[in-house]
Amino acid sequence: MKAISKGRRKESWNENYMKVIHVIAFILLAIGGLNWLFVSFGWNLVSMIFGMGMVANFIYFLVGIAAIYEIVMHAKHCKMCAGPAVAK
């Protein structure tokens, strides 16, 4: 009985951790998407706020990693894509 409760606690922690990662990735993708919207009007908000240095490059790197994460994990997190019509 104790093994089950330990497994559930670990699974719950893992689910919470993955939810946090998913939310962070979503926020980074929203920031990146909005930045591209503003770039289309001639304003790069990331470079306006942080300049064209290492901080801006790091933000672009994080947005890229978030995009890769969401591409790979999308079907697992998306309630519409994880339905019975999608083969797992």
Image (tube, helix red, strand yellow):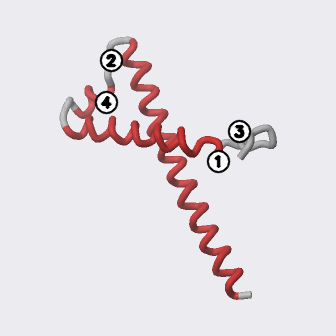
- Tell me the distance, in whole angstroms, between the alpha carbons under discs 1 and 2: 35 Å
- Tell me the distance, in whole angstroms, between the alpha carbons under discs 2 and 3: 34 Å
Q: What label sits on residue 43 in the rendered view?
A: 2
Marks 4, 3: nearer the viewer: 3
Marks 1, 2: nearer the viewer: 1
- Tell me the distance, in whole angstroms, between the alpha carbons under discs 4 and 1: 30 Å
Dividing the image into 4 quarters, which one contains the N terminus? bottom right
Q: Earlier in the sequence, mark 1 or mark 2?
A: 2
| Horizontal and vertical percent position of residue 28 | 44, 39
- Tell me the distance, in whole angstroms, between the alpha carbons under discs 4 and 3: 32 Å
| Residue at 53% across, 47% down | 23
The residue carrying pointer 4 sits among few (fewer than 14), some (14 to 19) or many (20 or more) residues within 10 Å by Cα, namely many
Q: Answer above or below: position of 38 versus 30.
A: above
Marks 2, 3: nearer the viewer: 3
Kind of residue indicated by mark 1: Lys
| Mark 2 residue element | loop
Q: What label sits on residue 81 in the rendered view?
A: 3
